[in-house]
Image (cartoon, rainbow, N blue to C red):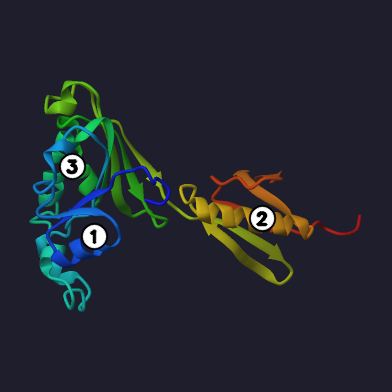
Amino acid sequence: MAARPGARVVASDVDERAVACAASNGVEVYRGDLFAPLPRTLEGRADVVVAVVPYVPTPELALLQRDTFTFESPLSYDGGRDGTEILRRVLTDSPRFLRNGGALLLELGGDQADVLGDDLARLGYADVIVLVDEDGDVRGIEATLAAGPAGNGGVASTRTNTRRRRHAMSKLVRMDQTGHTTLAEWRADDPEAVERAVRAFRTELDRGYFAMVSTGPGHADQVRDLPIDADLVIMRLPISGG
């Protein structure tokens, strides 16, 4: 909200404690199930729908950590037989609120992105990106509501294009005779972390270090500016002597 002061953020939750917490942070929030309590005036106007809903398959609830339900109920995790019951409801109802070209961000896991592929295509979503973490585990999907009839409940006329995007941390590392030290970690979509990394990068340059970035197996280039999309940037001291 701080980065987009003009944005209107609207939320819903069935848990009264979550609703109270969101309200205390200045969010316009409604208590109820998914889209049901939201004002009808939002229909067709939302730029982004973000949903973090229960997606653990019912048979796997018993496999969660022992203290999981100490402060939360199974309702917060139970996604039905295969974990997609509530996810499918979000997919189905989101087009009513999204504008054409709007984005859906949905947290999920396992093979659920593949399981939901036919639903995404049928409901008019395009350019589906499967989001994975640094270990390669699926953590969510990002999809765009296509313009045209499919986005209004019709049948999608084109096949959904699905890609995978790795959301790994980039690292700035200093290497010298004492070993290696991580100076900064960042993601390209985190401006504050990027700014900290740039400051650390410039500090090392001022200290006489130079920066190397891999450009392929066995190849590296020296850079003078921090490439924020690089996975790893290594700072080294020049080799002294001839």
Q: Which residue is mark 3?
A: 116
The percent position of residue 36, horizontal first and vertical second, equals 8, 47
Residue at 42 percent of width and 50 percent of height = 167
Q: Amino acid at mark 2?
A: Phe
Question: Toward which corner of the image does residue 81 lie, by quadrant?
Answer: bottom left
Residue at 10 percent of width and 50 percent of height = 85
Q: Amino acid at mark 3?
A: Leu
Looking at the image, is mark 2 or mark 1 earlier in the sequence?
Answer: 1
The answer for how far apart the CA atoms under marks 2 and 1 are is 39 Å
Looking at the image, is mark 2 or mark 3 earlier in the sequence?
Answer: 3
Circles 2 and 1 in contact, beta carbons < 8 Å: no
Q: Which residue is mark 1?
A: 23
Residue 110 as seen in the image, left or right of residue 91: right
Residue 186 as seen in the image, left or right of residue 15: right
- Callout 2 crowding tier (Cα within 10 Å): few <14, some 14–19, many ≥20: many
Q: Is residue 203 above or below residue 90?
A: below
Residue 171 as seen in the image, left or right of residue 160: right
The residue nearer to you, when weighing 69 against 65, is: 69
Residue at 67 percent of width and 62 percent of height = 174
* Mark carried by residue 201: 2
The percent position of residue 88, horizontal first and vertical second, equals 13, 45
Q: Is residue 77 above or below residue 191?
A: below
Foreground label between 2 and 1: 1
